[in-house]
Image: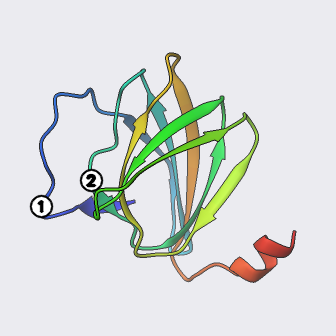
Amino acid sequence: MTGDSEDSPMTDRPQAQPTTLADTDMHRITRFDFAPGAETGWHVHGFDYVIVALSECRMTLEMPDGTVSEVALPAGRTYHRPAGVEHNVINGGTAPMAFVELEFKHGLDRAALDAG
């Protein structure tokens, strides 16, 4: 996850807590811990990425066009997105949630991921 969006609206929500686990020339791995209601803040992904849910994740995704999506991932499930995604991720559940984000600095073979 890279940089805040320039038009980031301020909120009163608590912030998710990122912990960098690794950062090499090939990838960056970050753990995100969210209290209920916590958010990442608006950001644009500079790289293709995969998240792995460490706990049940009930995410509310705010998008720049004003749409809001609810995504539920059980622990151990993954999803991937391309570079350029802009959003604010909020813990929409009542329990803490955590995931690990793997960013691929030289791209990701999304077709292989979709097939597997």
Residue 114 vs residue 45, the one in the foreground: 114
**6 or 103, which is in the foreground?**
6
Classify mark 1: helix, strand or loop.
loop
Q: Quadrant of the C terminus?
A: bottom right
| Quarter assignment of residue 38 | top left
What colouring does the structure picture have? Answer: rainbow
Left/right placement of residue 66 relative to residue 7 reads right
Residue 7: image tag:
1
Residue 10 at what x, y percent from top left? Answer: 12, 42
Q: Are marks 2 and 1 in contact (CB under 8 Å)?
A: yes
Direction top: furthest residue: 94
Q: CA distance from mark 2 to mark 1?
A: 8 Å
Determine whether 105 is above or below 59 in the image.
Answer: below
Does residue 106 lie above or below 96 as drawn? below
Q: Residue at x 50, y 74 (%)?
A: 25
Q: Could you tell me residue 95's position as x and y percent?
A: 53, 17
Q: Secondary structure at mark 2?
A: loop
Q: Is residue 6 above or below residue 110?
A: above
Q: Amino acid at mark 2?
A: Trp
Give the quadrant of residue 1.
bottom left
Give the class, few, some or many, for how many residues have Cα within 10 Å of label 1's Cα (few <14, many ≥20).
few
Hey, which residue is sitting farthest front in the picture?
67
Image coordinates of residue 6 in percent, x first then y, are 13, 64
Residue drawn 42% across the image and 22% down it: 35
Which label's residue is closer to the chain start, 2 or 1? 1
Instruction: Give residue 8's quadrant in the image.
Output: bottom left
The label shown at residue 42 is 2
Q: Amino acid at mark 1?
A: Asp
Residue at 28% x, 62% y is 64
Classify 87 as above or below 109.
above
Would residue 115 appear left or right of 71 to someone viewing this image? right
